[in-house]
Image (spheres, rainbow, N blue to C red):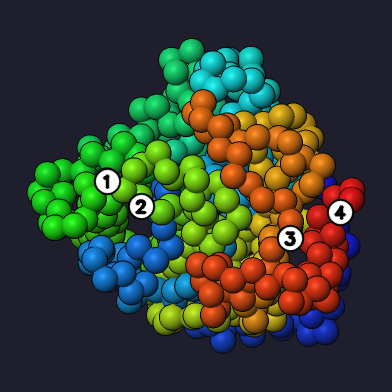
Amino acid sequence: MKPTRYFRAELERRRMKVTHSGLAFLLVLMSCGVPAAPDSPPNIVLIISDDHGWPDYGFMGHDVVETPALDRLASQSMVYTRGYLPAPVCRPSLATLATGLYPHQHRITGNDPPGEWPTNAWDPESRALMEAVFAKSETVTELLGRSGYQSHQSGKWWEGNPLDHGFTAAMTHGDVTRRGRHGDDGLVIGREGLDPIFQFIDSAKDSPFFLWYAVFLPHTPHNPPERLLEKYRATGRAEPIAKYYAMVEWLDETVGDLCDYLDQKGLADNTLVLYIADNGWISAENPSDQAEMRAKMSPYEMGVRTPVMIRWPGKVPPGRDDATLVSSIDLMPTMLRAAEIDPSLDLPGISLLDRQALSERDRVFGETFAHTAVDIENPVANLKYRSVVRSDGWKLILPYTPNRDVTLTIRGTIADWMRFEAELYQVLDDPHETRDLAAERPELVTELHASLQDWWEVPE
């Protein structure tokens, strides 16, 4: 993989930093409270919520949704409230978490292969082509497995049989002929308890383990238990919104059950827990309006922003960071660093254990593609938007205008709501992106556009 100009410069900066002092890496870890040589590798738990709006947590200040377990996890974690996802839709977002790469690098840019939905979604040959593209990238489970980790997959998984990608145990069978599109048997986790995960933890014995808990919550179908739904029914609140709120609390309960089990087994102190959402969501009175809103599958904050949490008792001090930019590309380097596995220099992310490097980051990048791929091998053919957010809050959303006629297909519904001019927002002051300032700040648009070109050199 050939790094772009932006990452060639970034990689050189990191090399120079390490070259300047052979102790640099150890000093960074020591400053975070991380010992240079832990007695045993930590267990790693990756919790991924599904279709979850970034403000919709108690610890993020929501005035209705109750998330006591996630609030407790947040109190024990370093919480980054300015987390971002490079791609605001399930499959490419999860592929980024698995590989540490941007979608245009791992080349999983949309949920389904070319063709009409839903026929193409179940076509074995088309699915196999996308899975073969994914298989060209090395996964975190493959790297962890070579270091003795046992790993368990549950919940969302799009890329065929997880056992082909480094997992040692999996709920998803990956057989498209059994209509296994994005998780099949694995999707019951959480909604039907966590026993498969508990059994795996018990079977790991003295081996370090990795859990991929990509729970199918609060994703539709929004069918929460009546006991939770009744809490959120209120005069003037639409039933679909009440259902979504209840789904968020249902997710929260499962996170509580998982963390409680780690405590009961005496595993919490040597377990790194990471939390992130795969993409955003906006609850709406009419669920069909979701496609018309600035959330999932859009480059706006409600589509691409998420809180990110890291809990590692005694190693990562708890706290809240409302300033530092982090990205889902950072989670794989974090897991590998914790396991003392050297990541490839081509990985674009920064370990969350490296607070100094994070503090020096001044921007993060995103890319939005068509839900259904136009060309599996060529990411540019599927590109709709690129975006960049600077640490000072300036955000540019730039359409890829050659693809302006590519309509977005969502389960057969055409949502041709895309706008095609550059948009500029100050998201610290205007997090809902209500004031487009591109016309007032053309010089800033030009500077941020150049940054995007350096990051991903797309033909103009």
Residue bearing the label numbered 4 = 457
Residue placed under numbered mark 1 in the picture: 240
Kindly check if marks 3 and 2 are in contact, taking CB atoms under 8 A apart as contact.
no
Q: Secondary structure at mark 1?
A: helix
- Nearest to N terminus: mark 4 or mark 3: 3
Q: Earlier in the sequence, mark 1 or mark 2?
A: 1
Identified at 33% across, 74% down, the residue is: 61
Locate residue 231, reporting x and y percent.
12, 56
What's under tag 4, amino acid-wise? Glu
Which corner quadrant of the image does residue 450 belong to?
bottom right
Mark 2 is surrounded, within 10 Å at the Cα level, by few (under 14), some (14 to 19) or many (20 or more) other residues, namely many
Would you identify the image quadrant in which residue 117 lies? top right
Residue ID for mark 3:
422
| SS under mark 3 | loop
* 112 relative to 458 in the view: left or right: left
State the image coordinates of residue 299 (x, y, percent, origin top left): 60, 55
Q: Dot 2: what SS?
A: loop
For marks 4 and 2, the one nearer the N-term is 2
Secondary element type, mark 4:
loop
Question: Where is 24 relative to 388, above or below?
Answer: below
Residue under circle 2? 283
The tag earlier along the polypeptide, 3 or 2, is 2
Pinpoint residue 387: horizontal percent, then vertical percent: 69, 60
